Image: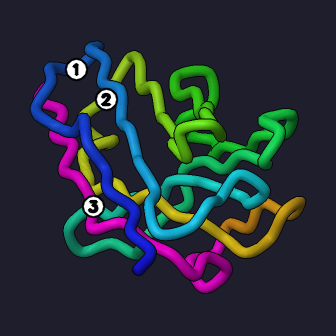
Amino acid sequence: QVQLVESGGGLVQAGGSLRLSCAASGRTFSRNILGWFRQAPGKDREFVSGITWTGGSTNYVDSVKGRFTISRDNAKNTVFLQMNSLKPEDSAVYYCVASDSTLYIGVRPREYGYWGQGTQVTVSS
């Protein structure tokens, strides 16, 4: 059984930082695209960031560029999202995702077949 388990969410003041982690089990994703989506109340799920298996290519939604950094540790089947300079509009449930693709970083939810249960990030003003 494949599982993606996120951790690291919480409550932080605007301008603060959080680091999300996602550990995969049940299969290895060392050759697959890993990423993060988020969903705020009343809004659609939004692509946040993705990373290729080598880590050599990454993609970010414009609103987090320069503030968020995605990384991965293939030996530990884990992906991370370092979030700095957090803003209230970053508040959402953050989901770890994995794709069967090895090269293409999709930005649509349907392009990811594996999802974690989500972790809440709340940024107070």
Which residue corresponds to the image point at 18% horizontal and 50% vertical from the top-left? 120
Name the front one of labels 3 and 2: 3
Q: Quadrant of residue 99?
A: bottom right
Q: In the rendered image, which residue does mark 1 sit on? A: 14
Q: Earlier in the sequence, mark 1 or mark 2?
A: 1
Q: Is residue 48 above or below residue 85?
A: below
Q: Three-letter amino acid code at disc 2? A: Lys
Q: Is residue 120 left or right of residue 67?
A: left
Q: Quadrant of residue 56?
A: top right
Q: Position of residue 8 (x, y in %)?
A: 24, 35
Residue at mark 3 to residue at mark 2: CA–CA distance:
19 Å
Q: Nearer the viewer, residue 58 or 60?
A: 58
Q: Nearer the viewer, residue 57 or 1?
A: 1
Q: Is residue 66 left or right of residue 44?
A: right
Q: Three-letter amino acid code at disc 3? A: Gly
Name the front one of labels 1 and 3: 3
Which mark is drawn over residue 87?
Answer: 2
* Labelled pair 1, 2 in contact (Cβ < 8 Å): yes
Q: In the rendered image, which residue does mark 3 sit on? A: 118
Q: Label 3's element?
A: loop
Which residue corresponds to the image point at 53% horizontal and 38% vertical from the top-left? 76
Residue at mark 1 to residue at mark 2: CA–CA distance:
5 Å
Q: Position of residue 85 (x, y in %)?
A: 38, 17
27 falls in the magenta region: no
